[in-house]
């Protein structure tokens, strides 16, 4: 049976009417992807303004923002099942409507559970709509289905939009107020839905596959584990970690969800995430690399903002302008990965080493140049390196998941693990560890620096005690940041030595199967599920 996205001659998209020029059809879906990626439940760049105008805390906004990443990650395991159940038009219209509702809710609510739940659902539908668009134009991007090439496109869109989203949000707030970002995105999403209804036909694949045999209980339990893990990382410092009942309760619930899921995976025929995906060598290696790498660059979430704002005195617009430097690094990193890794097939080991070299350069720049009066332009080199390093490591190890040898029935489960460790844990665990390290280091350095503040010291006789306290805290912050950058730099260099000492001859050869093959594979799962009589609610 023919693949409805396989071109007969020049690439074409049957979902789009022929009155749209063939050359413009793929760009229509790229427009949809950009609108979808710009939309979200909450916009983290507006967190300080939301805190100031609502009863929410900074941690509440962060939890809602990370809930969107959790919804995105948990969707990976079933996104292909949904793709082959509904047409592209249905997926885009439904996702657009859900994201419109999510923007309206998040612009008005002050309920933390509602905010987190809304962002989780928004993340789920953002991922599904993104897949619907990207899978439609996959053969246009890479006719041979080379996923190294495809992921370069994916990350140049996704990571670039993250930076541009923050820039757009702050400048909208500067000229108006934070709610306007929600109204603008609501209008763009409504425009997208209208364009989809006019320009995209309800073409469904030749093989209808019902949503049978999906372990929805497992999905709920995995989502519960992710929520508890993120809650501990985000609220840990606020509640003083496990001294608080809230953190202990989240730990118990999270471990219970994890334990039940692992137990169910021992006897379910098709669990939401199977042991085969968890035990895969490439998945384990990618998880380890992500945890180390994103912890090394977690300083961006912990004290880059406070350093630029409190020590250097940058206002919000100057702070968000730093995103342009990261954006330039992302573009350069994607281009470099495309020409070396995707086209020339450089080894995984080589690309990982390059990413860690860039991360070490980022840390070294801050370690040696951090001071009280540096210019904004001096941030370009370290932030450029950070942007390039993060996108290189993400493309390389996501490609390794495709090349892991897993059958297609298990491959989406590995993507869920990759999404959780790379996006959720990368954004929460590293900042939690670095934040706690900073707290203890700053207390130690403040104690040492204040040792000379005594009654018989003539140099401070006429200085108010409040001013002295501020001076000590400022000096302690700078010294502590330099110390932490130093330790992280050492860790990065050790990690780089381990990578260089390892033997890694593998080169990228990650070819995605034909959509007809994927459909047959999924249909076999559904048929097997029906024959065994095992059903997961």
Image (cartoon, rainbow, N blue to C red):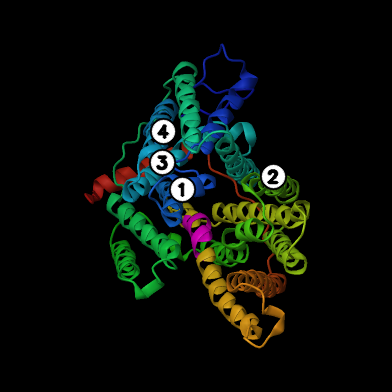
User: Mark 2 — residue?
Assistant: 324
Per the model, the C-alpha gap separating discs 4 and 2 is 29 Å
Check disc 3 and report the residue beneath it: 122
Mark in front: 2 vs 3: 2
In this view, the residue farthest toward the bottom is 456
Q: Callout 2: 10 Å neighbours few (<14), some, many (20+)? A: some
Q: Can the viewer see residue 465? A: yes
- The magenta span reads 420-429
Would residue 64 be found to the left or right of residue 435 on screen?
Answer: left
Image spot of residue 487 (x, y percent): 66, 75
Q: Name the secondary structure under disc 3.
A: helix
Q: Secondary structure at mark 1?
A: helix
Which of 224/153 is in front?
224
Q: Could you say where residue 177 lies in the image, as x and y percent from the top left?
A: 51, 36
290 versus 89 height, above or below: below
Which residue does the image show at 49% across and 61% down from the upper left?
428
**Residue under the point 54% across and 77% down:** 440
| Magenta run includes residue 378 | no
Mark positioned earlier in the residue sequence (4 or 3): 4
Q: Measure how far apart labels 2 and 3 are at the Cα level.
A: 26 Å
- Write down the residue under mark 1: 52
Q: Closer to the N terminus: mark 1 or mark 3?
A: 1
Circle nearer the N terminus (2, 3): 3
Q: Which residue is mark 4?
A: 95
Residue 453: percent from the left, percent from the top? 63, 83
Q: Name the residue at 36% across, 61% down.
A: 228
Q: Residues within 10 Å of mark 4 (few under 14, many from 20)?
A: many
Please determine whether, in this image, residue 196 is positioned above or below residue 515: above
Q: Foreground: 396 or 103?
A: 103
* Residue occupying the point 50% across, 65% down: 429
């Amino acid at each position: 049976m023919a693949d409805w996205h396989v071109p007969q001659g020049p690439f074409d998209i049957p979902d789009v009417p022929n009155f749209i020029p063939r050359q413009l059809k793929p760009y229509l879906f790229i427009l949809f992807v950009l609108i979808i990626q710009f939309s979200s439940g909450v916009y983290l760049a507006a967190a300080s303004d939301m805190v100031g105008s609502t009863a929410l805390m900074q941690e509440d906004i962060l939890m809602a923002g990370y809930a969107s990443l959790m919804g995105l990650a948990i969707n990976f395991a079933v996104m292909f099942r949904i793709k082959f159940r509904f047409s592209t038009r249905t997926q885009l219209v439904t996702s657009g409507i859900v994201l419109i509702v999510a923007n309206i809710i998040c612009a008005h609510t002050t309920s933390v559970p509602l905010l987190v739940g809304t962002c989780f659902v928004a993340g789920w539908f953002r991922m599904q709509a993104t897949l619907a668009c990207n899978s439609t134009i996959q053969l246009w991007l890479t006719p041979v289905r080379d996923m190294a090439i495809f992921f370069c496109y994916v990350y140049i869109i996704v990571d670039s939009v993250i930076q541009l989203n923050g820039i757009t949000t702050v400048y909208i707030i500067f000229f108006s107020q934070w709610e306007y970002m929600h109204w603008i995105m609501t209008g763009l999403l409504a425009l997208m839905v209208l364009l989809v209804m006019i320009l995209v036909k309800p073409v469904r694949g030749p093989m209808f596959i019902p949503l049978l045999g999906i372990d929805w209980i497992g999905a709920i339990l995995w989502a519960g584990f992710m929520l508890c893990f993120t809650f501990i990382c985000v609220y840990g410092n606020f509640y003083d970690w496990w001294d608080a009942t809230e953190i202990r309760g989240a730990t118990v619930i999270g471990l219970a969800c994890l334990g039940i899921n692992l137990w169910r995976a021992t006897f379910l025929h098709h669990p939401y995430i199977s042991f085969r995906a968890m035990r895969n060598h490439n998945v384990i290696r990618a998880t380890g690399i992500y945890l180390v790498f994103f912890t090394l660059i977690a300083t961006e979430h912990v004290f880059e903002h406070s350093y630029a704002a409190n020590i250097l005195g940058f206002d919000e617009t100057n702070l968000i302008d730093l995103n342009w430097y990261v954006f330039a690094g992302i573009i350069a990193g994607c281009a470099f990965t495309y020409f070396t890794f995707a086209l020339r097939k450089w080894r995984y080991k080589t690309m990982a080493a390059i990413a860690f070299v860039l991360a070490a350069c980022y840390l070294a720049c801050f370690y040696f140049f951090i001071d009280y009066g540096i210019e904004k332009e001096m941030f370009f080199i370290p932030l450029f390196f950070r942007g390039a390093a993060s996108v290189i490591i993400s493309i390389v190890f996501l490609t390794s998941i495709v090349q892991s040898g897993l059958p297609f029935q298990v491959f989406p489960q590995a993507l869920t693990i990759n999404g959780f460790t790379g996006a959720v844990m990368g954004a929460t665990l590293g900042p939690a560890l670095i934040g706690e390290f900073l707290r203890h280091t700053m207390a130690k350095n403040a104690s040492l620096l204040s040792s000379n503040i005594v009654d018989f010291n003539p140099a401070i006789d006429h200085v108010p005690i409040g001013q002295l306290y501020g001076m000590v805290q400022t000096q302690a912050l700078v010294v502590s940041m330099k110390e932490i950058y130093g330790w992280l730099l050492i860790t990065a260099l050790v990690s780089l030595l381990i990578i260089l000492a390892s033997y890694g001859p593998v080169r990228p050869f990650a070819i995605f199967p034909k959509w007809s093959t994927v459909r047959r594979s999924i249909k076999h799962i559904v048929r097997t599920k029906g024959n065994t009589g095992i059903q997961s609610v």
